[in-house]
Image (tube, rainbow, N blue to C red):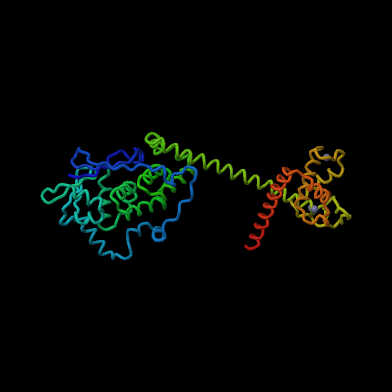
Amino acid sequence: MASPDMRTPWLSSAVESFGGSFKIHIKEEEEETVETVEFFEDPSSPAYNPHNIPNPPPAPGKIRSKATNPRQLSNSDCVPNEAKDTWDKLFKEGYGADVHIITDDGSFIPAHYALLSVASPVLGNFLQQSKVKNGIRCIKIPGVPRDAVSAFIRFLYSACYDEGDMKKFVLHLLVLSHAYSVPLLKRVCISHLEQGWLNLENVIDVLQLARNCDAPRLTLFCIRMIVRNFKNISSTEGWKVMRQANPVLEQELLEFVVEADSRKQDRLKKIEEKKVYLQLHEAMEALVHICRDGCRTIGPRDKVLKASQAACSFPACKGLETLVRHFSSCKIRVPGGCVHCKRMWQLLELHSRICDEPDYCKVPLCRHFKVKMLQQTKKDAAKWKVLVSKVNAAKNAVSLFSSRRADL
Ligand SMILES: [Zn+2]
Ligand SMILES: [Zn+2]
Ligand SMILES: [Zn+2]
């Protein structure tokens, strides 16, 4: 009797979760293993690169439209319901069955050799090898609950399934669909998992199955969920079983988490940096404004401030005003002297490097720094160039943001 065996402990105790490498033993007789198919994880696959977790690609267009309701995958519009009912009836009644599929509880499911062979060439191959007794071929599918085997065989007949059975046995059906090469069922299972049945409790099991069953998109879904919910997931039963059975995978997942964390830190650092350059840009604007228009207590450089002057709208103006006032009255007004003055010198120099109208500019020392720039060292020039370009980038980002807001 040929019998593909799925008895390897691939379900963890708590949630019937995956807990080890997944093997299918194909047995000729009860105890005699003639062939073992193993599904090793493929570390060379780009999906497993711990340094790169791209967004899962969209499902193929054809599937995607149907996948919004995965059930539709099994209910093709081209096949009338009556036809499916006929096949479903044939499965349920087992009329003229010439195959017995024996399950773990010792019972059997009657089926038809010709239909099974067409629906799953892999299964057909096992059946071909099996012995025929009284015109009946027997095949065993162990390691999977009887109801899961029944749902699997029913799908082979009519592509029909009960939603409850599918939900309960989706992991078993994923394995069966992969092992017996039934692509439509595999797509249905993956689609259900990707669109809602994946959760914190089962994600570790699903990840392992997805890798073993060659489902790279589902693998990415799982990895993203694990990285985002690492704290909760790492305390689940599935994780504990996985770390025992597959420490290499645990290590890989930890790398994903660390990598994602450092990317997050980098992002935060960049946001902070951008804030600094934005403040510098605002200071530059306020400086020109103070020297050109005057503001509050400080008059324009060559005019007296009007008492009725409108309130200032430059966010950096107030702070800069204080600094300008200090700068004009400080006794140690040299570079490297008072810390406030030093800051003012830097702001004035930065302005000069950004300013493209030194001949008309009212900002003090604008032209002085332009002349000084001619004698600067290469190193200094490079340093200032980077700073100027970052401040300009902040300026451009602000104007892009304001123009977008204006468009809204
Ligand atoms: Zn102002
Ligand atoms: Zn000072
Ligand atoms: Zn200037």
Q: Quadrant of the C terminus?
A: bottom right
**Above or below, comparing residue 344 to residue 294 in the picture:** above
Q: Nearer the viewer, residue 129 or 75?
A: 129
Q: Nearer the viewer, residue 315 or 257?
A: 257
Q: Residue at x 65, y 58 (%)?
A: 400
Q: Residue at x 19, y 54 (%)?
A: 113
Q: Quadrant of the N terminus?
A: top left
Q: Residue at x 81, y 57 (%)?
A: 310
Figure disc tally: 0
Residue 185 in the image, given as x and y percentages of width and height: 32, 54
Q: On the picture, is 65 further left or further right than 258?
A: left
Residue 31 in the image, given as x and y percentages of width and height: 20, 37
Q: On the picture, is 265 further left or further right than 172?
A: right
**Above or below, comparing residue 343 to residue 85 in the picture:** above
Residue 325 in the image, given as x and y percentages of width and height: 84, 45
Q: Quadrant of residue 42?
A: top left
**Above or below, comparing residue 404 to residue 220 in the picture:** below
Q: Residue at x 14, y 50 (%)?
A: 136
Residue 19 in the image, given as x and y percentages of width and height: 35, 38
Judged from this view, the residue extending furthest toward the left is 134
